[in-house]
Image (tube, grey):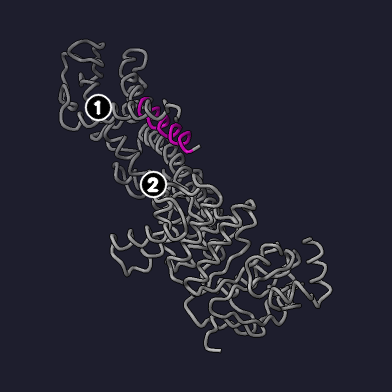
Amino acid sequence: MKKRNYFLSCGLALSALVFAFIVLGYFWTPCDPMKMDGSVRECAPSLAHLMGTDKFGRDILSRVMKGAGSTLFVALGTVVLGTAAGTLVGALTGYFGGWVDEVLMRVNDALSAFPSFLLALVLVSVLGPGRKHLLLALGIVFIPSYARIVRTEFKRASVQNYVKSARLMGASTARILFVHILPNIWPVLLSALTIGFNNAVLAEAAMSYLGIGVSPDEASLGYMLSDSQAYLAATPWYAFGAGVVIILLILGVGLIGEGLQRREL
Amino acid sequence: MDDLVLEVKNLNAWYRETDARGRRTRHDVLFDVSFELRRGEILGLVGESGTGKTTLVRNILGLVNTNSGEIIHYTKRPQMIFQDPLSSLNPARTVGWILEEPLRIYGKYDAPERKRRVAEIVRLVGLPADCVARRPRELSGGQRQRVSIGVALIQKPSLIIADEPVSALDVTIQRQILELMRSLRDEYALSFLFISHDLNVVYQLCDRVMVMKKGRIVEQNTVAELFANPREEYTKTLLAAAD
């Protein structure tokens, strides 16, 4: 009988909660997140405004619900893009070695030679603001680290006899890479994925904090955090709302990652 | 000689190595190896480690390019059974998936037909029917080796190359696996190239034996002959060591 995996169940429960919160925000928010109301500026949390209001009298709970969606969109997109491209590069370099490895990994090295933040900054300033561009920039920045992890795993797997055996069956290279080897590196990939997701949430927050992330009308959590900084002493609840959701989001996914890793052992 | 499955003629093999100073040196591994293997024959290959057995296998399987000499396959490409079945069976997949994979790649049968063939092979190699849902590491060593024999068999080869297939198993299980291989040979006229360092096992199973030393085949004879009158000094030492 297996020991109960509390990490996994807690992580799933927490993530489901945050996810439900975000999905709900997509369809319904207590107030219009963009509506300004001069009569309720900088209100402390109350029954009418559960998380209070900001300096323009906008309902913070509604803004957090919308903003978390932006953050999740960018973080998920980043992870999907970074993992897909990173897995492809890592699989090819790890399996083939030789000049494929040399060429792709030198490009990879060049990419990771930039401080990742600087690279994202450059890309966003070239592409322009907006969450799609932010997603693209962060995705590209995330490729090298995934590629490296995946490459090591494929390198290790490609000398195993089960790969040799697949080749003797006449399996195509693509089949060997993604049907035979990939399932074996899932555990490693998954934990890299959850860490990557958390990094992406934080990176999005940091970029928006610096004002080069999402555009103001898409207000993400990071954007709200940076916005709240100036009023931290006067309206601490503003920072609190956005901060707590970021923490819950990261905690949930982190616990899932931890739980998955333990399950494999 | 119309019943040959494999013929190796004057095979030489070497590899090049570049040392730290960039000088390329040539290491010779196989010297003028020639032999043939008939349908339904179990040919043993003995020799100490580092003598070129693995290189010979890699050449026969076509995993490396032949340097010089000729390897003629009279049938489809041979299949391989490895020493450690745990590493040759995909650890992330179930036994059923592993057995079905060659059929999927082959792409000639629909799903129900593939399942039927897998069940047939499972019976043939003497595995319990419920093992298809399990993963390799949940099976015993003997069962795993039965699975890898099944993977080879499901591709209907004429020749199976077995690289130390029983040396990781204990003696009773060894006997069962050897028995299985012999019955497969009898029933389907399969040929085996059986690589081992254990002369007792070779004596039990093989029809003919080749003795390899430092990349050369030094002696080649029927099992009875070779064990009764070893001609080469080296064979005598091997036999003495086995007793």
Q: Chain of mark 1?
A: A
Q: Is residue B57 visible?
A: yes
Q: Over which residues does the magenta segment extend?
A: A248-264
Above or below, B216 against A37 in this view is below
Horizontal and vertical percent position of residue A56: 22, 21
Above or below, A217 against A37 in this view is below
Mark 2 highlights which residue? A139
Is mark 2 in CB contact (under 8 Å) with mark 1? no
Q: Nearer the viewer, residue B101 or A191?
A: B101
Q: Residue at x 61, y 71 (%)?
A: B57
Horizontal and vertical percent position of residue B200: 70, 62
Above or below, A212 against B175 in this view is above
Q: Is residue A178 visible?
A: no
| Circle 2 crowding by C-alpha within 10 Å: few under 14, some 14–19, many from 20 | many
Q: Quadrant of residue A142?
A: top left
Which tag is nearer the camera, tag 2 or tag 1?
1
Of the image marks 2 and 1, the number of the one nearer the N terminus: 1
